[in-house]
Amino acid sequence: MTEEVLQAIPHRPPFLFIDKVIETREDGIVCSRTFRADEKFYEGHYPNAPLTPGVLLCESVFQAAAIYLVKKAQASGDADFANRTPVLCRIENAKFKGMVFPGDEIIIDVKDSETLAGFYYLSANVKCKGKTVLQIKFALAMIEKK
């Protein structure tokens, strides 16, 4: 993982699912994560036929989106916005279209859709080996840091 990722969100291993930021755009972000064969969750999901849990693919999306919103907050110069942290508040239309195995790298492309009353509605497309493995829509709220 890069220092850029570590500075943007509070997540740390073993619950950090972003390795690096590839691109930051005005309307979104592209990040990557390689799932290593030695990660503990593979021991139970599934023994002798390891498969990356879908919930962890979703979590990688939410972490990428959090990085995007933190960068957006920093760029805005708005101290109130910058003193907030993104928190997941809605998941909808998660569509799993493929599997991710130990050693696979995913590319996470998050797009900002709209902002309503402090809620940020986003969507993401996750690819592995050039093929879509997850499409999801979700919302994050910016809450005061404690």
Image (cartoon, helix red, strand yellow):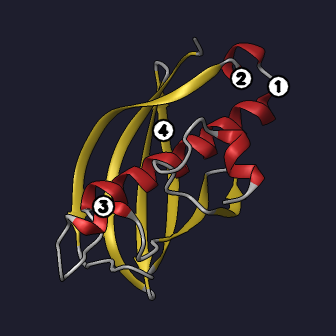
Q: Amino acid at mark 1?
A: Gly
Q: Position of residue 41 (x, y in %)?
A: 30, 61
Looking at the rendered structure, the secondary structure element under dot 3 is helix
Residue at the disc numbered 1: 77
Q: Amino acid at mark 2?
A: Ala
Q: Amino acid at mark 4?
A: Glu
3 and 1 marks in contact (CB < 8 Å): no
Q: Nearer the viewer, mark 4 or mark 2?
A: 2
State the residue in front, 60 or 139.
60
State the residue in front, 115 or 131.
131
**Cα distance in 3D space between marks 3 and 2:** 34 Å
Residue at the disc numbered 4: 114
Looking at the rendered structure, the secondary structure element under dot 2 is helix
Residue at the disc numbered 3: 41
Q: Position of residue 139 (x, y in %)?
A: 39, 37
**Cα distance in 3D space between marks 3 and 4:** 34 Å
The tag earlier along the polypeptide, 4 or 2, is 2
Q: Position of residue 94 (x, y in %)?
A: 24, 56
**Cα distance in 3D space between marks 3 and 1:** 39 Å
Residue at the disc numbered 2: 82
Residue at (48% x, 38% y) in the render: 114
Residue at (44% x, 55% y) in the render: 60
